[in-house]
Amino acid sequence: MNALKRNLKELGKYPSAIGGGIIILFLVFLAVYAIVTIPYNEAIRLWRGGEEIWGDNPRIVPPAWTNIFRKVKQPETIVRDSRDPADVTSKTVTEISEDMWDVVMTFDFDYDYDAFPQELNVFMNATFVEKGPFVSMFWITPDGREIRLGEVTAKRSETYRFVQDERLLRRLKGVEPQIALFADPDKETPTVLKGKYQLKIAAVTFEAGSDLEAKFVAYGTVHGMAGTDHRRRDLTIALLWGTPIALSFGLLAALGTSVITMAIAAIGVWFGGVIDELIQRITQINILLPTLPILIMVGTFQSRSIWVILGWIILLNLFGGAIIGFRAVFLQIKEAPYIEAARSYGASSWRIIFRYLVPRIIPVLIPNLVNGIPAFVFLEASLALLGLGDPVLPTWGKLIDDARSNGALYNAQYYWVMEPAVLLMLAGLGFAMMGFALDRIFNPRLREV
């Protein structure tokens, strides 16, 4: 153990170990942050949710920080909700007659972007018994023009989509509302008219106690820290939660296969004979088995759960090629004088294996363990990319598969692929740099003279 501690102190002399350690600590920080800020059940609920959760997000847009590198400033999403006093400029309820009331709401917002929004929607929630409110909407531009939008009889839950109102399209001469309503009328080519806009919603209710609440959403063309996907989901959820999943999957797979393989090799060497011969024959057969096709069959016919896949990966790697290297080292250690001394004072076989044989090979195990983590992380991502990823968990591989199946690369939506790919590369780079340094420290043949 003293030698192990001494070797670990030497890590500070290797720039690759320092760089790899910084990357690994960054990934660990992301993993802890994801677990603490977004509980597991909440992350699953968010990732599996649809319009009911992500309805205020634009569809398939890059991160908001990309505006830093753009000459044309893309709009972010603008939300105004009558249930939030900070969003509604005014809401008045006026009695017209004994059974009629006038409800008027106005939403003001500043628009100083250089591009037009993605789409415009108004979500209404009406309270009534039999007769729903009759709603009229008006758009007031910075230059004082008032444009009549549309009229609807609101249901208890009603969505007015500007682009689907054919009468509005005719009034706008066929130009899409998200362009026509923000365009400067004095310019021949569509150009954004910047300034303060106002949406006025006027409703007539026909029952005592009847009311109307509304939410206006002008969907932007950039959003959040990571952008959104085809289901309007914020990719930050998958990027954050993909980190603890990837690290835990890689660590458990590498730890399980390395430790158990080492124990099997030690048992075979110590007992020898039929046991050692049987282990070698199983290893030779197992090395010939194609791991990836077997995992594809498991994902297709048994389960796509990431933990079922993890169990099969450990099982298929128990008798991998590493067992041959461990066996060669154990054969040398078995003949050491301290092993003969342990035999002479009557130490049991299991005590010798786990107290004297196995600890001596830990310096060889550590670099193999660190180098094995990114290999298993990439394997999980590869299975997800083949469509065999866990259908429940948000992972980096699942993000790349969603991007591929929705044509992200063909539609220049590179962020959707690049973000998880960069994290995968960081994981591989960090552990590879650390493993390289550990290998030079624990393997005497690689040490510099």
Image (tube, grey):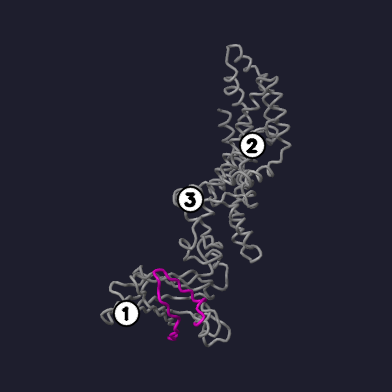
Mark 3 and mark 1 in contact? Answer it, CB < 8 Å: no
Amino acid type at image mark 1: Asp
Amino acid type at image mark 2: Asn
> Left or right of 168: which side holds 407?
right
Q: Nearer the viewer, mark 3 or mark 1?
A: 1
Amino acid type at image mark 3: Ala
Mark with earlier residue (2, 1): 1
Q: Which residues are magenta?
A: 141-167
Q: Quote the CA–CA distance across marks 3 and 1.
A: 47 Å
**Which residue lies under the disc numbered 1?**
102
**Which residue lies under the disc numbered 2?**
368
Closest to the observer, 266 or 407: 407
Residue 425 showing in the rendered view: no
Q: Position of residue 420 (x, y in %)?
A: 59, 55
Mark with earlier residue (3, 1): 3
Q: Nearer the viewer, mark 2 or mark 1?
A: 1
Q: Residue at x 43, y 85 (%)?
A: 146
**Which residue lies under the disc numbered 3?**
34
Closest to the observer, 233 or 345: 233
Q: Nearer the viewer, mark 2 or mark 3?
A: 3
Q: Position of residue 181 (x, y in %)?
A: 49, 81
